[in-house]
Amino acid sequence: MAGQPKHRISRKRLYQARQRYLPILFALAGAILVLNLVGVLRITIEPMQFVLNVKIGFPGHTVLKIPPIGSISAKTHGYQPLQLILALENIDLDQLRQIAFTTDFNSQQELVGYFQSKINRVLGMAVAKLMIIAGVGGLLGVYLGGTRRWAYLIAGFLIGSTFLLLITTATYYGYNIQAFANPQYHGIIDAAPWMISMIQEGLLKVDQLGEQIQSLAANLYAVFNQIEDLKDIGVLASDLTILHVSDIHNHPVAYDFISQVVAAFPIDLIIDTGDLTDWGTPLEAEIVNRIEQLDVTYLFVAGNHEAPDVLAKLEQTGNVILLGAEPLEIMGIKVAGMLDPSAESYSPQNVSIHELSQHAVRINELYGSQQHGIDIFAVHNHRIAAQIEPGIFPVVLCGHNHVQSINQTGATVYVNAGTTGAAGIRGIQGSQVVPFSLSVLYFTHDPELDRFVLAAVDSIQVQSLQQSFSLERTFITSERRNQEENVENSRQISG
């Protein structure tokens, strides 16, 4: 050694250092490359299935994808080079029903604890699988770097696994869930903040909400049993009776309400002016099954909260017919409708007032200059309905603003059913009580005109927290419509 030149000693040390440290670098590079290419796992947090995509890179962040609504991202751990992308893949509806009906969440803590236990178990399994993936990447890195010795290959596997474990541990302890208080939205940007605030409010009020729902269920059961008393008022003699509902907003109790009215009145046909759901997701579309159980022909015009998944489910339901611009004759009456301008998209946002006005203009231009013979025209938004010129249609049905009303201008009667679902979950959480409401339309056949003519409308409301309901009957005449003497006294029946 003493006789060797200094430059030869230096080269030998450099070679030894390379032999010692290069496998480590190759192992780290291989682990990063393989994780970024195939670091995808399917995980299940009952009743939901997710796809977790893990990537090594800066800045560290979390992305939550909720098809088809969009995605939400936040800088939850900027100093750790780990990017987490979690996409909702599926919801097992059978498991969801089982959890909903067999699990009793009496408090927010119980709800959080239920999911936290499942998340911790799934998280441990996911880290273990990712360590194996990173370990394989480390082994391949060493192998492709030219080292074939088993000791080095095993060391490469351990280096890759340890690297992943260190990063996930650092991310776990440095994770800031509060970063989602100021997230970035992609997709339905305007709607996402409303969705998150509604979820947060629902979690914060889960105790109070549970008590309200229990009280609501008990009160409504008592009220629905009294709807039979409406027969004491006298069901009008008519040739055709149509039930008008609107804005159910996922409220399952709405169909109990509808079922009671169908049982108490000789309903021939139901017309729904939209907003059956809130987001139009496949999960929400399950409420369509309640429509099929009614066993009554159900005409539907889409509102701004509908989406392709819900409309597809409706089309597959035997007793449902989606209304369109082309008149449909059923039971001798002609009905047509126009879906909301924002329907058939995944955004529940309202369009501008100008766009609504243009939509009404198109309806007036399309039907105003022709003999169409339409007896009832249905739209969702009350603003569009109000701008349909009087005389084009005898009856215009609408909803959207959750306010029940009957107005007559010229030869046209405008009927707003209000909200048959009491504005859904927002109605329960709101400071003001929103009643369940619907309208019953009585038609008689005019032999001279050879068409059905609206004779009267029953406006029915259920005040859920007061154990009472009301019925207001409005008679429609050709000379004086909606005059005070044409309206029967409201009958209030308290439980």
Image (cartoon, rainbow, N blue to C red):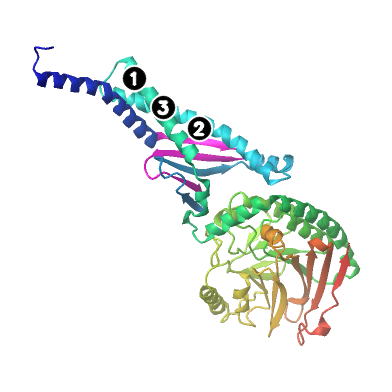
- Which residue is painted at 58% across and 81% down in the image? 368
Which stretch is magenta?
38-66
Instruction: Relative to 343, say whether 373 is above or below.
Output: below
Q: Which element carries disc 3, helix, strand or loop?
A: helix
Q: CA distance from mark 3 to mark 2?
A: 15 Å
Instruction: Relative to 7, say whether 92 is above or below.
Output: below
Which residue is disc 1 drawn over? 153
- From the image, which quarter does the N terminus lie in? top left
- Which residue is painted at 54% across and 77% down in the image? 357
Q: Which residue is nearer to you in this view: 260 or 248? A: 248
Going from the N terminus, do you reach mark 2 or mark 1 first? 2
Residue count near mark 2 (Cα–Cα under 10 Å), binned few <14, some 14–19, many ≥20: some
Select label 3 or label 2 by which is in front: 3
Select label 1 or label 3 by which is in front: 3
Q: Which mark is residue 126?
A: 2
> Residue 460, percent across and down?
79, 68
Going from the N terminus, do you reach mark 1 or mark 3 first? 1
Q: CA distance from mark 2 to mark 1?
A: 24 Å
Q: Which element carries disc 2, helix, strand or loop?
A: helix
Please check the rendered image and state whether residue 49 is part of the magenta-colored stretch, yes or no.
yes
> Residue 23, percent across and down?
29, 24
Amino acid type at mark 1: Leu
Amino acid type at mark 2: Ala
Classified by dominant secondary structure, the portion drawn in magenta counts as strand
Q: Is residue 179 found left or right of 247 in the rendered image?
A: left
Q: Quadrant of residue 161?
A: top left
Q: Is residue 362 found left or right of 460 in the rendered image?
A: left
Which residue is disc 3 drawn over? 162
Instruction: Relative to 287, say whether 85 is above or below.
Output: above
